[in-house]
Image (spheres, grey):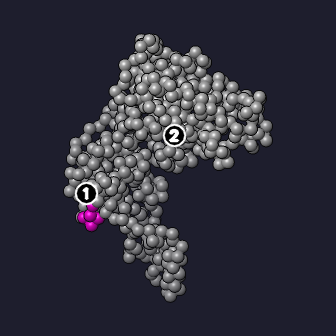
Amino acid sequence: MSISGIDSAATPTEEREEEETQEVTEQEEEEEARFFPPLWQQRRNLARRIIDEHHATSVIDFGCGEGALLSFLVWESTNEWPITRLAGVDMDGERLELATDTCQPQEFELGPNLRVNKLSIDIFQGSVAEADQRMVGYDALACLEVVEHLDPDVLEKFWGVVLGTLRPKLVIVSTPNAEFNVCFAQLKYGTPEAIFRNDDHRFEWTRQEFQDWCKPAAEKYEYTISFSGVGRLANSDPSIGHCTQFAILERRSPPPLPASGDTSLVPATECYTLLSRVKYPIYAALHSEEEILAFLHEKIALTRPRPPRAASEESDNYNYSWENGKDQVKIDGEGGGEDAKQQNEVQKGANTQSDPYQELEIELGVLSLDNLWLSLDVRQRCKTRSEMIRILEKSSLVRVNVEQDKICFDEEDVFWEEWDKEYEKRFEVDVSSDGQYSDHDEDLYEYGHGYEEEEYQHGHCDNGLHNMKPLGDRDDQQSPRTSDWKDGVMASWGATGWPERSGEGPAMDDSYDPDSPWNIPVQTPKDTWEL
């Protein structure tokens, strides 16, 4: 039995076990410490950050269980070193079946949302006490909350297998910090009745005990080592450290020869059983540099900062204008009189006083490089950020300042003006004789505004995710990775939406012209997929 909120990894099997076996009084539940974000999420966030900082593109998850960490590593990074190869190893066959399901591509990862880089995931059944030669050559190995479950004979072989045989450049190991148990009254830490956080734990180490286990191995196999941790409480004593302690080991270069007499350094020949291999489809359509540059110009035109809209002078009775960031009604025409003018002045004054964005300065003619790179359709075409910059540097319309992360351009250039005119023509509303919108315009106003619909239809979202719908509508997606995505990735990377359409690409309205010079194609037929 595990203590909820302390050592939970939030996997389905563990949640079911807790519901069936946990017997905690209401008073204990009230006293139970809470972490925010949840402790399991903090662990995965730190592991992912360390992996990204070390530019690891291939990772082994030792003791992967149901694929909790693997599903967290699946999400494609926007940096220059995306993960392209994952492997999960565990002894429990039932949990590995769940890991396979968890790591499958979801519907929203197809269609226009295809990955930029290849990703394969191998699920193995085997013991961490044995070295499989297929595990040699990975950049990183993570082993989160596993060593405390190992029997002494398996634990004794752990470092020889990991550091001596597999020898990844980076190793991340986490385990509970026993000193932090003092924060949980139900564990009775420091008394003869003390219990572990989980009934399956063989031990729980203090920080000194953990370091005494790690440091000799790091020195023996020529690794540098540092320690960190996650999980603090507002009222906890800083001197007791974190709830979960981490060891980060980096292989020295060049790697030394194996120590004499260490039989664990001789890898067995494929002693693990490969249960499944998952491959993700990628965006494989080819584009010339000229096509990519034209696409980047269109993307900049669409996402660049705009000045506030000027009030239109053409109106019968009411004229909706954009002023100081707010819609307001300007009353004109016959019947308005002095009262109408006075009311208009009062309204304008009220808006001016209450508008928090009144003094917000918009820098025209400038767009962040990161804003452009975060768009998935840009990454699909350019593949790397450096390639995007190289192509932009050939443009006569924009100037790239890499040091300041800026794309600069002349907002008054005729290109941008003509582009805006063509763009707005797409959303001219046809009104029939009875004053009703025609069927032609129904799709445009599905979201209440033509500009929003265009962004949805063409996948032009600043965070790079296509065809979004609000986060609150996401839970009906029965994806094994839903929990990790919502609580983990979104908290780490700030994504705010969920794909709505997938597979066949976005639907186009009747006015869509595939031959238009302003067309930005995003439909992705299956013949552009590649596994």
Residue range in magenta is 409-413
Q: Which mark is residue 78?
A: none
Residue 283 among magenta residues: no
- Which secondary structure is most common in the magenta stretch? loop
**What type is the residue that disc 2 sits on?**
Asn
Q: Quadrant of the N terminus?
A: top right
Q: Nearer the viewer, residue 513 or 505?
A: 505
Q: Secondary structure at mark 1?
A: strand
Q: Earlier in the sequence, mark 2 or mark 1?
A: 2
Q: Is residue 177 visible?
A: yes
- Please report the residue visible at 50 percent of the width from the left and 82 percent of the height from the top: 345
- x and y, in percent, of residue 229 in the image: 55, 38
Please tell me whether residue 347 is drawn above or below residue 326 in the rendered image.
below
Q: Is residue 412 magenta?
A: yes
Drawn side of residue 475 relative to residue 285, left or right: right
Q: CA distance from mark 2 to mark 1?
A: 36 Å
Q: Which residue is mark 2?
A: 45
Q: Nearer the viewer, mark 2 or mark 1?
A: 2
- Tell me the SS state at disc 2: helix
Q: Which residue is mark 1?
A: 399
Q: Are the residues tagged 2 and 1 within 8 Å (C-beta)?
A: no
Residue extending furthest bottom? 338
Provide residue 438's location: percent of width, then percent of height: 43, 58
Nearer to me, 185 or 468: 185
What is the number of callouts on the image? 2
Say which residue appears at 43% left-offset and 28% top-offset.
223
**Residue 510 seen:** no
The crowd level at tag 2 (other Cα within 10 Å; few <14, some 14-19, many 20+) is many
The image position of residue 469, as x and y in percent, is: 50, 48
